[in-house]
Image (cartoon, rainbow, N blue to C red):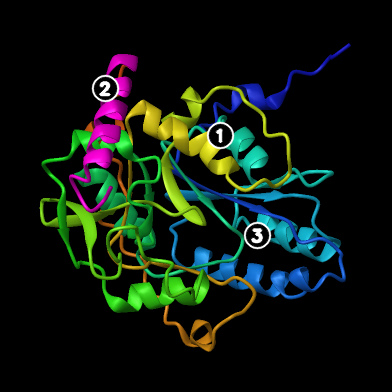
Amino acid sequence: MRTIPNPEKFKNSKIQNNFHRIVIPVYIPDSDVTYFSNLFEIFKVSIQSLLKTTDASETVITIINNNCKKEVSDYIDCLLLEAKIDKHVKLATNYGKVYTILSEAKGCYEPYITIADADVFYFNNWEDEVFKVFNNFTNIGVVSPVPSPHLVDYHNSSYIIKNLFKLKKGNIINSKSFALFKQGISNNPNFFKKKNYDCLDLHYYLEKNNVKSCLGATHFIATYNSRIFKDLPLNKPKYTFKMGDEGVFIDKFIDKFGYGRLSTNNAFAYHLGHSIPKWCESYEFLKIERKNLKPNSRTYNLNRQSIILRYFYSGMYKILKKMKWLKIF
């Protein structure tokens, strides 16, 4: 029987409400497999670049520990003790990326949530550039700080049809951004080639208030309107890793709901993979200055399309694709 009241009842402590949460699942086991040999060092470089490019007063960080080895777990614990991150989720087994981000994102209170791999190097102003896109275009579901013109039509059909007469085409992405993408993702010369055109030369984009945004968004880092996750069905992934699961459990629903997938025109993040380029050591981090980080209520409120519109846009997309009305198809 309790004889003394809980003193916390009388403090009336307010909870700090932030509007952006970054979620990073990580799996670095105690293994001799070559794939994992350098991942801990890469993870530390990634986290340090993240901490130097985000404002702790506005943004909070969650790291999901998929049963990592002790050294990694201890490192994340230190980040938590030093209040550099907000949350350390420890799991007794590896549940993979999709399972863990779904369980975390569905309970997210923040209006926006960034899901990133554990090997991303963050550049100055990446948050500001992402929210510049969110604040200037309506009904956007996801924005990536890495230009992704090769993914223009990936689960983006509804948004393309709705904005068909607003679409512009041209070469708006600088060569340095493509070079960074190639270094971090793929050196395949055909990686950016679509069936009818080369994404290195032609990009589809939207423009409003002198802000240009490329259609398409990549997976290794992307910022979502968190309302999306509240509307997702309670489907559970069956496998720790299965190619295409992000499309099955997240991306296809963004398209069904009628929300857009966009990206910044320049690269504000880099995929480290298994190596740390020398330029990372000399990269100059600037003082954080926020201009676009506050969410715009008009653009934050999503208008989910009806089932009738979903089938209409889907049908129109298929017809135009068959007619080859745009190179995009």
Any part of residue 183 in sight: yes
Position in image of residue 151 (x %, y %): 38, 53
| Residue 30 falls within the magenta-colored stretch | no
Query: The residue under label 2 is which amino acid type?
Result: Phe
Q: Residues within 10 Å of mark 3 (few under 14, many from 20)?
A: few
Say whether marks 1 and 3 touch (CB < 8 Å). Answer: no
In the image: residue 87, left or right of residue 111: right
121 or 70, nearer to the observer = 121
Residue type pointed to by label 1 = Phe
Q: Is residue 80 above or below residue 282?
A: above
Q: Reading the chain from its start, which is encountered first: label 1 or label 3?
A: 3
**Sequence-wise first label, 2 or 1:** 1
Q: Residue 25 or 195: which is nearer the viewer?
A: 195
Q: Quadrant of residue 75?
A: bottom right
Which residue sits at x=64%, y=72%? 42
User: Magenta region's main secondary structure?
Assistant: helix
User: Residue 63: x, y in percent?
Assistant: 64, 51
Residue at x-position 55% and y-position 42%: 246
Name the outermost residue toward the front: 323
Circle 3: element type:
loop
- Magenta stretch? 307-329
Quarter of the image for residue 32 reads bottom right
Q: Which circle marks residue 249 in the picture?
A: 1
In this rendering, is residue 197 above or below 143?
below
Number of the front mark, 2 or 1: 2
What residue is at 58 percent from the left and 57 percent from the top?
117
Judged left or right of residue 242, residue 14 is: left
Mark sitting earlier along the chain (3/2):
3
Per the model, the C-alpha gap separating discs 3 and 2 is 52 Å
Q: Mark 3 belongs to which amino acid?
A: Glu
- Residue beneath label 2, please? 312
Find out whether residue 320 is within the magenta segment: yes
